[in-house]
């Protein structure tokens, strides 16, 4: 096995994706190859740094922040539902334009309503 | 982990259940947006947009996918859209993916703040590589869960993750060596 193939084993090792045989093979190679062994140390250090990235949380409740918009959405949907015959899909729910909403999604959705 | 019964109640039109569900996921949504966009303000905007979208699209979720991967698909898509809008001219060729390291990466490492340096380095990754790293390390997703979230083939997920780690370790090694940028 070439060094290049060992690098893939190192990567998969970080994700706990190696079989016992593959792991043994990697460890044997690392003992004899200084270059791979150096890379493996750096990858392991990076992996540990990435695992310790701060688990950030929002400064205030996002759901509380969007409550007014949710109420407005409910009002609009109520209006649509009254006007539409039953058992028809509601366009607001599946509108393709949802996929490209900008920074103020609610504004653009509401603007698009009849 | 959101209970399947809660998801079903929310889908059946129980508004309280839907609000409870949104409260349970808001931190996870925000965490992705924060690491995707690199700052608090954009992350707040993107997360709120994601929660609104989940509120209106909850009916379209199907149980064949995990709920958490469905949620992450929505938030990563919103972040990638914003990322493209913010930097419309940037297109990084896969084969020439190089880092243009900002001066502060060097400063952070010299200051011994490796964790901050890692974050700065993540900010330089192309959007899809960054999403893979975020799902793998901030959410402990498996290869399969990442593939489901990003709707990418499994091999592509692995190749993005491996390439991202390779690039990150190169960047950090170069600066740890006290390397002068060339
Ligand atoms: Zn080797």
Image (spheres, grey):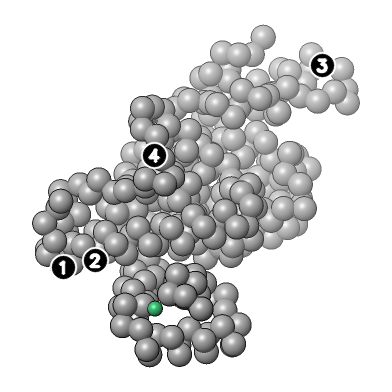
Q: Residue furthest top?
A: A114
Q: Chain of mark 2?
A: B
Looking at the rendered image, the disc whose residue lies closer to the viewer, 3 or 2, is: 2
Tell whether label 1 touches label 3 (CB within 8 Å).
no
Tell whether label 1 touches label 2 (CB within 8 Å).
yes
CA distance separating discs 3 and 2 = 62 Å
Q: Residue at x 73, y 58 (%)?
A: B4
Instruction: Give residue A112's quadrant in the image.
Output: top right
Which residue has dot 1 on it? Answer: B177
CA distance separating discs 3 and 4 = 47 Å
Instruction: Indicate the secondary structure of the residue bearing disc 4.
Output: loop
Which residue has dot 3 on it? Answer: A84
Vertical relation: B176 (above or below) B9: below
Q: Residues within 10 Å of mark 1 (few under 14, many from 20)?
A: few
Which residue has dot 4 on it? Answer: B92
Give a yes or no on whether discs 1 and 4 share a subunit.
yes
Looking at the rendered image, the disc whose residue lies closer to the viewer, 3 or 1, is: 1
- Viewer-nearest residue: B1 or A33: A33
Label of residue B173 in the image = 2
Tell whether label 2 touches label 4 (CB within 8 Å).
no
Instruction: Indicate the secondary structure of the residue bearing disc 3.
Output: loop
Earlier along the polypeptide chain: callout 4 or callout 2? 4
CA distance separating discs 1 and 4 = 26 Å
Q: Residues within 10 Å of mark 4 (few under 14, many from 20)?
A: few
- Viewer-nearest residue: B7 or B99: B99
Q: Residues within 10 Å of mark 2 (few under 14, many from 20)?
A: some
């Amino acid at each position: 096995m070439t060094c290049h193939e060992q690098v893939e084993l190192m990567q998969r090792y970080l994700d706990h994706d190696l079989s016992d045989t593959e792991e043994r093979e990697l460890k044997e190679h690392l003992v004899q190859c200084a270059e791979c062994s150096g890379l493996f140390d750096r990858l392991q250090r990076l992996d540990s740094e990435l695992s310790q990235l701060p688990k950030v949380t929002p400064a205030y409740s996002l759901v509380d922040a969007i409550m007014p918009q949710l109420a407005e959405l409910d009002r609009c949907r109520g209006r649509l539902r009254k006007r539409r015959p039953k058992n028809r899909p509601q366009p607001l729910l599946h509108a393709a334009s949802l996929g490209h909403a900008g920074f103020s999604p609610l504004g653009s959705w509401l603007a698009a309503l009849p | 982990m959101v209970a399947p019964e809660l998801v079903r109640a929310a889908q059946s039109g129980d508004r309280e259940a839907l609000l409870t569900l949104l409260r349970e996921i808001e931190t996870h949504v925000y965490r992705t947006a924060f690491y995707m966009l690199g700052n608090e303000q954009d992350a707040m905007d993107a997360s709120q947009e994601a929660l609104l979208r989940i509120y209106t699209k909850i009916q379209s979720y199907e149980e064949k996918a995990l709920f958490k991967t469905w949620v992450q698909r929505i938030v990563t898509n919103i972040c990638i859209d914003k990322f493209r809008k913010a930097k419309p001219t940037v297109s990084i060729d896969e084969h020439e993916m190089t880092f243009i390291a900002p001066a502060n990466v060097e400063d952070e490492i010299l200051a011994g703040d490796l964790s901050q340096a890692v974050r700065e380095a993540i900010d330089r990754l192309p959007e899809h590589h960054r999403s893979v790293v975020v799902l793998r390390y901030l959410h402990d997703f498996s290869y399969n869960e990442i593939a489901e979230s990003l709707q990418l083939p499994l091999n592509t997920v692995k190749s993005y993750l491996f390439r991202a780690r390779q690039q990150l370790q190169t960047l950090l090694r170069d600066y740890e060596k006290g390397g002068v940028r060339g």
